[in-house]
Image (tube, rainbow, N blue to C red):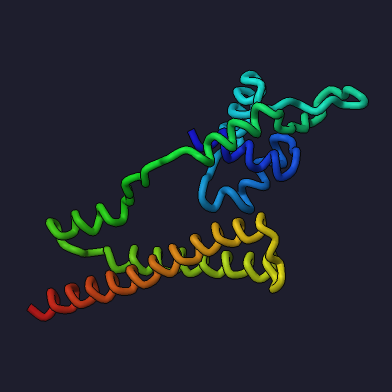
Amino acid sequence: MSLPHAILTALLEKPSSGLELTRRFDKSIGYFWSATHQQIYRELGRLEEAGLIRALPSEVPVRGQKKQYEVLPDGRAELVRWVDERQDPKPMRDALLLRIRAAAVVGPQGLGAELRRHLELHRTQLAEYEAIEAKDFPPGRNADPDRLRRLVLHGGIALEGFWLGWLEEALAEVEDMTAAGTEA
């Protein structure tokens, strides 16, 4: 149920077309809540049908013109309700963790290369988050909305730091097992 709320959030930040929302998701919200172009457009239709958003009137109707959407008062009320709602953390599902568990049964062959690949992906993501922080959150930018956006970014930075540390530990263990296996 979070995609509609992600869209309401983005539209409250700035009324946008579906294409603009897709681009904005790729650069911000998509780091922690991804959605395809099709999912966003489908959800815009549902939100409009539910009376939570509306297409802004166009001064000159033109065929093929992008609809700009804005949040209506009921949409804002829904987002406030959702922010105040209790929600338990979701159980983690990660294919890499499952693969490592499976390697306990069938052996870790090939796992080292995959762990190194994941390490590089997480290093790249961490560098991207740090660049966003440097660009978008200069010292002194402390308005409440900026503080909350920075907090979300710091969550992403902390998660990437966790994954880097854990992957380095996992890689060392797998390499140690692989080396021990070749010595036997």
Q: Residue furthest left?
A: 184
Which x, y percent locates residue 75? 64, 30
Q: Is residue 35 above or below residue 157?
A: above
Seen at 62% across and 46% down, the residue is: 25
Name the residue at 59% across, 37% down: 80
Asked where in the image residue 12 lies, by quadrant, the reply is top right
Q: Is residue 58 toward the left or the right of residue 144 in the image?
A: right
Badge count: 0
Left or right: 28 as drawn, with respect to 58: left
Q: Position of residue 108 (x, y in %)?
A: 20, 64
**Which quarter of the figure is the C terminus placed in?**
bottom left
Residue 35 in which image quadrant: top right
Up the image or down, 125 lies above or below 168; here it is above
> What is the residue that sits farthest to the right in this orientation?
60
In the rendering, at what x and y percent does residue 33 appear?
A: 52, 46
Q: Residue at x 39, y 67 (%)?
A: 162
Residue at the location (76% across, 26% down)? 55
Residue 2, relative to residue 181: is it above or below? Answer: above
Is 102 displayed left or right of 38 in the figure?
A: left
**Closer to us: 128 or 159:** 159
Residue 90, x across and y down, in percent? 36, 44
- Residue 146's quadrant in the figure? bottom right
- Residue furthest top in the image: 49
- Answer left or right for 66 relative to 148: right
